[in-house]
Amino acid sequence: MRRLDAMMAEWNARGIRLGYPIPSSPEGGDLDAETEVPDSAWTAIITNGAIRIAPSFGKQVMPETKVTAKQSYNTLLSLAAMPAEQQFPSTLPAGAGNKPWNYDRAFVAPPSDGITTGPDGELEFS
């Protein structure tokens, strides 16, 4: 359990946040804790965990398991590598692509709030 918690904490520090409940201390792990880990991450967790605990049982890891662990970990890295979407600030100049009919706008439009919820709980799209 400690090695699994350590591996998940390491992945969390690398930006791979999967919803695993990382304990605050090495002795704080709970086998009955609920996780929010997506199904697509289980292969990476199981195979990489097996590689980490195999030496303590005096076992060698099969090459196929190492390949699967590497491929599944790379998949998690590629999913975590997607940059977060963001809006341009209103102080950004519109630039050379500013069309003649938009000369009154020297800067890009101010950021919108995106999705807001009204007082009655209805969603308003702006």
Image (tube, rainbow, N blue to C red):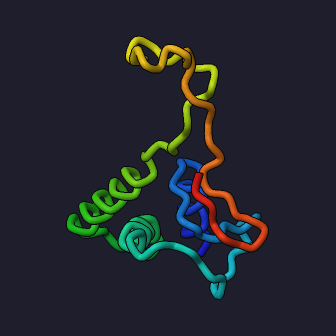
Q: Is residue 113 visible?
A: yes
Asked if residue 22 lies left or right of residue 108, the reply is right
79 vs 57: above or below: above
Instruction: Tell me which residue sits at (56%, 75%) in the image.
Output: 36
Q: x and y percent of residue 96 in the render?
A: 40, 11
98 vs 38: above or below: above
Q: x and y percent of residue 109 in the render?
A: 57, 30
Who is closer to the viewer here, 28 or 78?
Answer: 78
Q: x and y percent of residue 111 in the render?
A: 62, 37
Q: Is residue 58 visible?
A: no
Q: Residue furthest right?
A: 119
Determine the image quadrant of residue 19. bottom right
Q: x and y percent of residue 60 in the render?
A: 31, 69
Who is closer to the viewer here, 64 or 114?
Answer: 114
105 vs 1: above or below: above
Identify the image quadrant of the N terminus: bottom right
Instruction: Tell me which residue sits at (45%, 51%) in the image.
Output: 80
Asked if residue 19 lies left or right of residue 79, the reply is right
Determine the image quadrant of residue 64. bottom left
